[in-house]
Image (cartoon, helix red, strand yellow):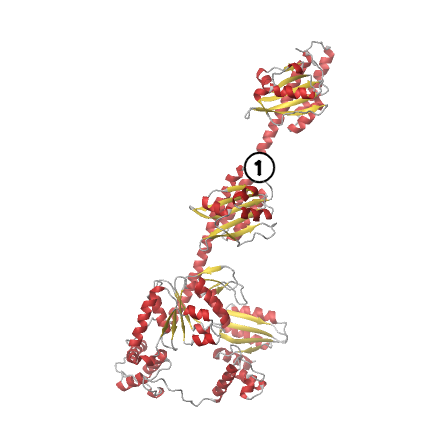
Amino acid sequence: MLKITIQPGARQCRLLLEGRLAGPWVAELRRAWQAAAQSPAVFVDLHEVDFVDLDGQALLTEMHRAGVRLEASSPFVRHMVEEISGAA
Amino acid sequence: MPSSVPIRPEATRARYEALLEVAESIAAHRQLSTLFGDLSRCLAPLVSFDFICLTLLDEKQRTVRLHVLHTDRELVGTPPGPTPLEQSPTWMTLQSRRPYYVPDATQDHRFPILADLVRANGIQCFCILPLHTAQRNLGGLQFGSFRRDAYTQDDIDFMIQVARQVAVAVDNALNFETARAYEEQLARERDRLRALLEINNAVVTCLDPKPLFQAISASLRHTFGIDYISLVTYDQEANTFRLHALDFPEGSGIIREDALIPVDSSVVGDVYRTREARFLSIEEAALSWPSTADILSREGLQSIGCLPLITRGETLGTLNLGSRRAHFFTPDDGQYFSQVAGQVAIALDNALSYKRIEELNARLAEEKIYLEDEIRTDSRFEDIIGQSRALRSILKQVETVAPTDSTVMIYGETGTGKELLARSIHQLSARRQGTFVKLNCAAIPTGLLESEMFGHEKGAFTGAIAQRIGRFELAHRGTMFLDEVGEIPLELQTKLLRVLQEREFERLGSSRTIRTDARLVAATNRELASMVEQHQFRADLYYRLSVFPITVPPLRDRQEDIPLLVRYFVQQNARRMNKRISTIPAASMEALTRYSWPGNIRELQNFIERAVILSAGPVLQIPVRELKRGPSSSARPAPDTPEVQTLEAAEREAILRALRESSGRVGGAQGAAAKLGMKRTTLQAKMQKLGISTRGY
């Protein structure tokens, strides 16, 4: 289960994710990202995400390569974000 | 007696030739109205008259009705309605099969109604001819004149022939009208049957109440031109009627779906109770149910029909029909619409049953997932170990409160076994056959907590890709264990309070109220009373939860139970690891007993597991140096001595403390950056590096 809260702003659009980024919710995040694509900058807040599966990780990698900022605090997700950032 | 002035043969022949032409013309008429209109014009060349009329016989009612075909002056005093047979000369002529000729109307008093009519209009003489065929009597044809004794015997003989032709024409028209009436009736029956078939198709194919109702109302509207159709169902829990579905496109919005209708003082209530259909005008409805009539008349409805929906001996609700036309519903309609209502009742019963089955299946599936998850994470239900007075006192309280269904609040430090106690309360209650549903409020992201507790509808928020049943629904007729109840955000506490008080809630994204019969057991390691004072926890919820508080003692207050717990955990882990540990050295046990166990039973359990792993032989080897030497059991634990920390950990702790004190504010004079003596941007960079967020302060 993943809840996506879209917080549009003048300078950036923030996607606040809560729950697990896995399964069908990966496609949901992609849709939300596409909806936010008009903003100058997109920022994904992963502080409340406790699990990301492989498909979710692939999407986050794609988003990061497209210039989206990712931030996380749980050890698992933070480590994954660091890997994504390092790989990019 | 008629006068006998002979007519020349040539004139007689011409008369009969003209009659033949007229006969062909009038026999072609298919409708009585057009025949009547044409008769006087056609007969005027053949017979001299000042007025001509026709009476039609109604043998069932034993009356005749007068139809005036022509008169030079306007007739006055015509009977307003049909005349009884015995008072009409038409019947006499039909029985005798002979004309009735009155040369001087002033002298004839046999039939008062006729006599009044002729006198009032100055008619001096008249002749009535019987109209009949071989199969039936039709009525009479009447010629009148303002002259006395206007007709000769020849005239009368000719009139008899004319009457024969008119009889054929009238018989044809009547037959045609009868045939057309039958045809119309057949067409009506066909349309009704077609509508019933359409409804039956909808009954068979639609299991969702809304599309089912739409199909049925479309058919009724199309076939009968009904303006208003609604479905009312009885809500047993709320003891009221609810307008379940409505098809009234021209309505102004006064009547709405989901509106509540009182059980008493409504037509619906009466029909539901008596199980008898009612077809009323608005005026009739106003006599017994003025408020219902007022609402319907404001919407322009003049006729209403209300039918009970009965299936398998039970009344589910009512089917309600309305029209803006007065006297819309006929007596025939009652039986037909009752058949429709019967079909609708079956369909509604099926749809509601299917919906209920779907809900139960979904709930069962969720329960299965939940329970499978429970089995995976908590494979064995561990008994509560201990014999200390403190523990026995707690268990006694559990035994007392468990069967009562009361809300229980369990206070205790982390790792003291609050969940075990909650499970014991469930097992000792009458709800033991129901589900024990657990929810750790601290483990769920705040944004998902409401959905986790109460469920959500598909599309309720971004990410709600399917309907989800919440924990409170799963716990219906079972026990809901809310762990870390102090972590519930203030805005969600209101909803929780409503569940406790009203036993109802709505799923996220839904307006449908769901009732739940879940017994609540809550637990926390926080001081809820202090949180109430700091406005972090609602006072009304606190008092509602604290109906029966149980405080679980920390392990340090039950030192006599430590040896029992140690042996239990040693056995459990040794069996699991396939080891044989038969001895626990006395010194080790003493060390274990004297330790303060700030993490309580959980810490002890983990410690013993590690000890079993490290033990190579049958003697338990405990890493004593890991145990902090604390004071005796009667004293409170000494304050923690500061340990050497990593720089990163020290920085994190300082930043978190500063954020708490500044309520999450980073910049500004009262912000965390000022407290730490650094620039805002520096602090933000450090926070990002350490993965620290300002949310939650």
Asked if residue B253 is positioned above or below residue B573 in the image, the reply reads above
Residue B476 visible in the shown view: yes
Question: Disc 1 residue type?
Answer: Ala
Query: Could you say where residue B350 lies in the image, as x and y percent from the top left?
Result: 46, 50
Q: How many marks?
A: 1
Pick the residue in front: B390 or B508: B390
In percent of the image, x 67 and y 26: which residue is there?
B36
Q: Is residue B57 above or below residue B152?
A: below
Residue B383 placement (x, y as % from top left): 31, 72
Location of mark 1 (residue):
B187
Q: Residues within 10 Å of mark 1 (few under 14, many from 20)?
A: few
User: As drawn, is B205 to the left or to the right of B631?
Assistant: right
Q: Hey, which quadrant is residue B186 in on the image?
A: top right
Is residue B133 left or right of B515 when viewed as pictured? right
- The residue nearer to you, when weighing A60 against B601, is B601
Is the residue B116 above or below the residue B236 in the image?
Answer: above
Expressed as whole percent of the image width and height from the top left, the position of residue B378 reads: 37, 71
> Chain letter of disc 1?
B
**Is residue B261 left or right of B549 when viewed as pictured?**
right
Check the picture and name the quadrant holding the N terminus of chain B: top right
Secondary structure under the numbered disc 1 in the rendered image = helix
* Residue B336 locus on image (x, y percent): 51, 40
